[in-house]
Amino acid sequence: MAKKKSKKAKPKRTKAAASKKSKKRAMKASALPALSKLPYGKAGKALDGVRILDLSHVQAGPTCTQMLAWFGADVIKVERPGIGDITRGQLRDVPNADSLYFTMLNHNKRSITLDTKHPKGKEVLDRLVKICDVLVENFGPGVLDRMGYTWEHIHKLNPRMIVASIKGFGPGPYEDCKVYENVAQCAGGAASTTGFREGPPLVTGAQIGDSGNGLHLSIGIITALYQRMRTGRGQRVNIAMQDGVLNLCRVKLRDQQRLKHGPLTEYRQFGESIPFGKAVPRSGNDSGGGQPGWILKCKGWEEDPDAYIYFITQAPVWEAICDVIGKPEWKTHPDYAKPPARLPRLKQIFDTIEQWTMTKTKFEAMEILNKYNIPCGPILSMKDLAEEPSLRKTGTVVEVDHPTRGKYLSVGNPIKLSDSISEVKRSPLLGEHTEEILGKVLGYNAKEIAEIKQSGATSAPETTRAAAA
């Protein structure tokens, strides 16, 4: 009788093997899609498919949502009937047309007018919350909650919704305070360190409180969208304007800590033997880095308030600087040859360099200095920037055509992506897309749209319209 063949026992699955298989499954699930075969710039925009419910106004929120719109997000701006965003009428330079303040912060968006206190208006807003990915607001503290749109209510309507907010302060003694641009600059440390030592604190012309925090918020939103791909959940994104300004002033917080260990030697104050106090002083035009710099007069400064150049005495090119300004002896002189020896003499050194820059226009000086890799930068006025051909070519400055105010210049997207080409489209007229959004986005039929419009939820009384004109 033939012997039966014995079956081979299956090897037992070890924990290590199971873990390896689990990791492979996870990698497969999170794998990137196949490479697009479309040419670069033709595969759609980075944020195609993302829908933003924009309840923001003035500058900080609109800066954020405009940036997202430039990257392809569908931004639906909800505005008060008859009035809209308050900036439509602020600083108006063309009668009966949206101001540049509004148009330059609301490109590429769609506008729907909605009375959010009206029952039908609330119904429409609820439906918008359900179909959007992100809600952006920069109301005063507590306003969104008083409207009935608490985090809990929004999350119940749409658990995937990201709610992004800009407020003046984070939790603490000032969290209920209203904050505007210059208040944020003062509370965030910028003003105390801006200006000349002997003068008062100054705010900067760069809108680091509003536009700067709009950019901070956009980073938070994109990060939250990326996390949602793993968790499926929405979350809150909060930016305090004080926090954002301080983030941009981090080198001054660095100097505050250095000050405990001795004077800040790169400040001209040190070379002038003026004692430092307990806090970082205003540093005039001193460089924020370890390489001393200053703003110097150029040819024509007597008539032109912007005939200046920023000049940095970078150590590696010191010898070239000496040759250019006609001081070759400084290359070997013990008072000037090494950076530590130069620190107490910065005022005298820059005064001497200025004697040379005053013989050149700012552009002539820049051309000469760049040949030797000497860091410098002309003080460019807004007129200079508006007329600079290279900025037009890159889309940093764009000309936009508007149906009521005509052509105007605006800033384009400063972030350039090679596979997501930005285009700047004009800002919307007030309520321009109301019917389109009700029908094509929210799915209301013609009868329902007529009922909403007749109810007054999307239009303002005649008195309101007259007041806004």
Image: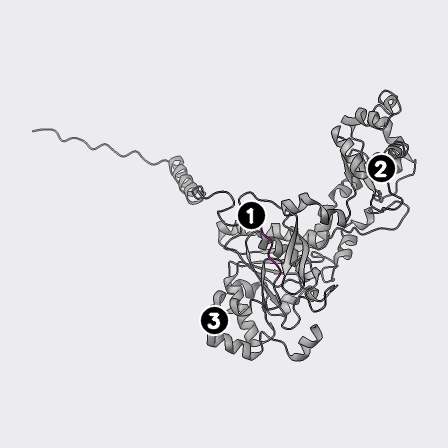
- Structural distance between the alpha carbons of marks 1 and 3: 33 Å
Tag shown at residue 444: 3
Q: Residue at x 75, y 47 (%)?
A: 384
* Nearest to N terminus: mark 3 or mark 2: 2
Q: Residue furthest right?
A: 273
Q: Is residue 238 visible?
A: no
Q: Is residue 46 left or right of residue 238?
A: left
Q: Is residue 204 above or below residue 174?
A: above
Q: Residue at x 50, y 55 (%)?
A: 49
Tag 3 and tag 2, C-beta contact below 8 Å: no
Classed neighbour count for the residue bearing mark 3: other residues with Cα under 10 Å, few (<14), some (14–19), many (≥20): some
Taking the spot 71% from the left edge, 67% from the top edge, the residue there is 89
Measured in 3D between alpha carbons, the distance from the residue under mark 3 to the one under mark 2, in whole angstroms, is 64 Å
Secondary structure of the magenta portion, mostly?
loop
**Disc assigned to residue 217:** none
Look at label 1 and name its amino acid: Ile
Q: Which residues are magenta?
A: 422-427
Q: Nearer the viewer, residue 132 or 83?
A: 83
Q: Is residue 250 magenta?
A: no
Q: Amino acid at mark 2?
A: Tyr
Q: Identify whether 100 is placed above or below 13.
A: below
**Mark nearer the N terminus (1 vs 3):** 1
* Residue identified by numbered label 1: 421
Q: Mark 2 or mark 1: which comes first in sequence?
A: 2
Residue 267 got which mark? 2
For the residue marked with disc 3, what is the amino acid? Tyr
Position in image of residue 98 (x %, y %): 68, 65
Q: Secondary structure at mark 1?
A: loop
- Judged left or right of residue 287, residue 104 is left
Q: Disc 3 on helix, strand or loop?
A: loop
